[in-house]
Amino acid sequence: MWSGRQGRLRPVGCVVEELRCRRREREAALRKARREQQLISKRLLRDDASEEAEGGCVAMILGETEIQHFLRLAQQGTEEKERERALVSLRRGLQHPETQQTFIWLEGSMRTLVGLLTSNQALLQLEAARCLHELSHSEQSAVAEACLPATSYLLTYLSGHSSDFISPHLTVLEALGYALSQLLQVKEAPEMIIPSVLGSTLPEHILRLLQPGPKLNLGVAVEFAWCLHYIICSQVDNTLLISHGGLSTLGLLLLDMAGAVQRTEDTGLELLACPVLRCLSNLLTEAAMEVVGGQNQLEDERVVAALFILLQFFLQKQPSLLPEGLWFLNNLTANSPSFCTSLLSMDLIEPLLQLLPVSNVVSILVLTVLCNVAEKGPAYCQRLWPGPLLSCLIGTLAFPDIEVVGQSLELLQLLFLYQPEAAKDFLQQSGLQVLERHQEEAQLQDRVHALQQTALHQ
């Protein structure tokens, strides 16, 4: 078998191993960059109906005197409505960075706010949690760090809830989940917060919240799925989450979401799909990958079928989520022949190819998944080749994006090595002429030359 710059005779196994190592190094770097970006990607506070009910009033910057006044009213007011209005005014003031700075330097302010979270009045709890919202997602690092004392209370409150972890006031639980998700992103979280979280019963409670069934509350599940995502991104101890059944719980939730989008179009589940897919993708990159084949095994065909239902839903309703689903598919197929077999046996290659025109990012991920399948050997390449793959790859070689072209070259190299008929078909379709346009590209010329040599010597 011929390959390489000088046309040297090299064993197929050596060429494939080089391709595999190059891809693994590139994917490891991409995963690291992606995980770091996800860890600092603070979400904006979602619009709330109560904001509209406030008549569009302009939030005022609050000084020290006003903050003290509102905190005192919230603590000592004689009427619940009066206390609630005080916290609403404080929350709206905390939307300004200037008020946030004044608040955190005011002695006892954070302690008072945390104390209000313990109120037995749900509306006061909710407004106190919303104040913590505003502080916890601040772009000012000092403000977010000032929220750290609230973490121990949140852990106590959330871990010590009822055995079903279902509050009678779900809006409060949702608000606290959001605040915790923001605190889990501060730079001190891996040392100061996440070890305490993992040492508590909270991870088990979170996974219980994400179990599909009649008790699943979408708003609460969304917030705690993001909490779980940031915990996983920190990589403090993901094997613990796997041992608690994280993969199997999230896998079952994925199946449930796929069923829901088939029943109705307006589910709102795309809000939950993003953190759930990220959790699954990142857990699958752990060194404890063998757990997937053990007690927490994901059902191959069911998970793959559910994922493709969601991919079709994303394509129609939310294309920006396609990369999340494809990252998960990439991680599923990277080290698992059984998941690759599922793709082939369920005739899912053509639906995958239909995603190529969506964007360069989507194209690269689709081609990466196909490389995962092809590198499993001749039997897989034989099942890949007859069909629309050749015309699609000739099309992607014409893309202006160098990464798309480079991934196409790697897939063709694998196919030519394991399925000689593919090289012959490529030559008959004027494939060499298509390659010539990339011969002068510095980043591609070595791979182009290697592919030309492989094609000519099959």
Image (tube, grey):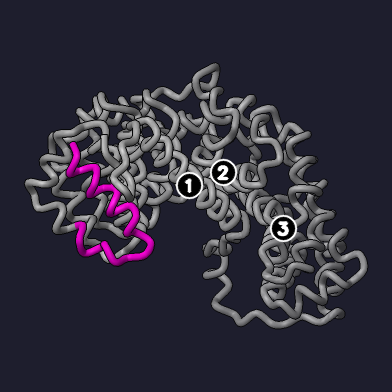
Type of amino acid under label 1: Glu
Place of residue 295 in the rendered image (x, y in percent of width and height, measured from the top left): 55, 17
Which secondary structure lies at badge 3?
A: loop
Type of amino acid under label 3: Val
- Classify residue 48 as left or right of residue 117: left
In primary-sequence order, the first of circles 3 and 1 is 1
Q: Residue at x 67, y 73 (%)?
A: 95
Q: Residue at x 68, y 68 (%)?
A: 138
The residue segment tinted magenta is 435-458
Which residue is identified by label 2? 225
Which residue is identified by label 1? 27
Query: Where is the N terminus found, in terms of image quarters?
Result: top left
Which residue is identified by label 3? 186
Which secondary structure lies at badge 2?
A: helix
- Foreground tag (1 vs 2): 1
In magenta segment, residue 314: no
Type of amino acid under label 2: Ala
In primary-sequence order, the first of circles 1 and 2 is 1
In magenta segment, residue 450: yes
